[in-house]
Each structure stands twice: as C-alpha cells, then as structure tokens.
Amino acid sequence: IAAMALWPLHQKFGIEKLIVSTYQAASGSGAEGMSELREESKTFLEGGQAKNKIFSHPLPFNVIPHIDSFQKNGYTREEMKVCWETRKIFGLPDLRVSCTAVRIPTFRAHAESLTIETRDLVTPEEARKVLSDAPGVKVVDSPPNLEYPMPITATEKYDVEVGRIRQSLVFGDKGLDLFVCGDQLLRGAALNAVIIAEFLLNNDEPAQKKAKTE
C-alpha cells in the first residue's frame, strides 16, 4: 500500500529514510480474522466478554501492536517484512526503514502513517502534484473539508488514497509526513506485479485502468 505513494516521491525527490506505522485491518488475517472480529464485536456489544483465537488479544474496540512473531531485535516479523520488501521493491538494500505494525478493528483496507527524509528539497505542494500524476494513487487531502484517507472510503477501491501531506517537523524542508490507506484485498501483490510488468514493457494502458472499466 505505502509503496504506491512512496515510489513516485522517491523518483522525484529521493527517499533516504522511512518511518512507518501500519494500521492493519482484520482481513490481513484472512476470512477467519474478519469472522472473529464480527462475532466477538457482537458478543461484546451484547454484554459478553470478547475472546480471541486468531489474534493475540481480543480485537473489538482494541488495537494490538503485535502482528506475526517477535524477532530477536524486538521487531515483529511483519515489521521486518515491511523493511525488507520496501528495500527490495525500491532496489535500495541500504535504505533506512523502521516500522511499527498494529492490528486495528476494521474489516478491510490497511492504513499507514509515513514519515520520509528526502535527498532533495521537497514541499507538500510539490508532493501533491507528483502524487496527483501517479497511477494507482488518489490524493485525498483537504483537512478543512474533513477529507483524508480512511478505510471507509478506500474499501473496494483499486486506488490507494494519500493525504495529510505536510512538511516534517523533524526533517524540515527535506522531509514529509503523510497518511495512506488502501484496500489490500484489491491492491495486492498480484495486481501490482501486473502493473509493474506492464510499466517495464512500456504499456500505455496498465491493467489497473482496465480493471476500473470492468
């Protein structure tokens, strides 16, 4: 999900550091995870005690900073996968990445908070322009109008929403903070692989555009 927004920014400004917090829906654990959230939410609302089998703790009305097994370095395997896969996708084995992965009580669409440090100067306005022209990305960034990426608006959509784009208070004029949200059940590895392959073949009509018309 995050790579859809990060890749065009990297092409334009160069990303040197990335800090990610992921907020992952129950569907990340499959149909069983969604079923557990649904059934245990009902139990809780009826005055019962929510239980857990799929997740490490009851998920209804809770957030769990634990996805997959903990590693020796204190990170979970899911958090390390974000680091490994980002480096692999970008072809940057030395990219400095840190991640915290959190399970949240939503059914679909993962969300991610991103902080980047860039090689070149960057402004929120320039970033919005780059992202507006990027395939597979929809800029939803008008906080005064209460418009920003959310699972409720990203669910069942092929485009990844990106918003809350602002200058980083840590990295200054070479950094940004932003928020992304996308339906990982649609915007998954298979579709992305097709889009990347077609891009490499200089195809002018990526599969994603075709999918929207079907």
Image: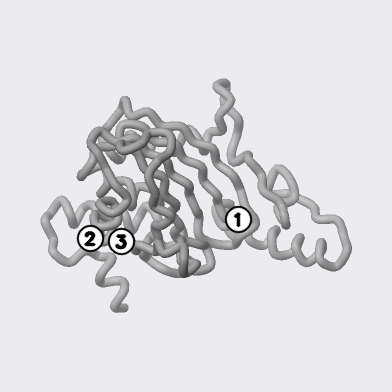
Disc on the earlier residue, 3 or 1 = 1
Disc on the earlier residue, 2 or 1 = 1
Above or below 27: residue 174:
above
Q: Are marks 3 and 1 in contact (CB under 8 Å)?
A: no
Q: Residue at x 65, y 57 (%)?
A: 105
From mark 2 to mark 1, how far is it between C-alphas? 31 Å
Q: Position of residue 206 (x, y in %)?
A: 21, 63
What residue did someone put label 2 on?
Answer: 133
From mark 3 to mark 1, how far is it between C-alphas? 23 Å
Please give the label number shown on residue 136. 3
Please give the label number shown on residue 42. none
Q: Secondary structure at mark 2?
A: loop
Q: Nearer the viewer, mark 2 or mark 3?
A: 2
Please tell me how crowded label 3 is: few (under 14), some (14-19), or many (20+) other residues with Cα within 10 Å: many
From mark 2 to mark 3, how far is it between C-alphas? 9 Å
Please give the label number shown on residue 26. 1
Give the amino acid type for the residue marked by disc 3 in the picture. Gly
Quarter holding the C terminus? Answer: bottom left
Q: Position of residue 162 (x, y in %)?
A: 39, 57
Q: Residue at x 28, y 65 (%)?
A: 208
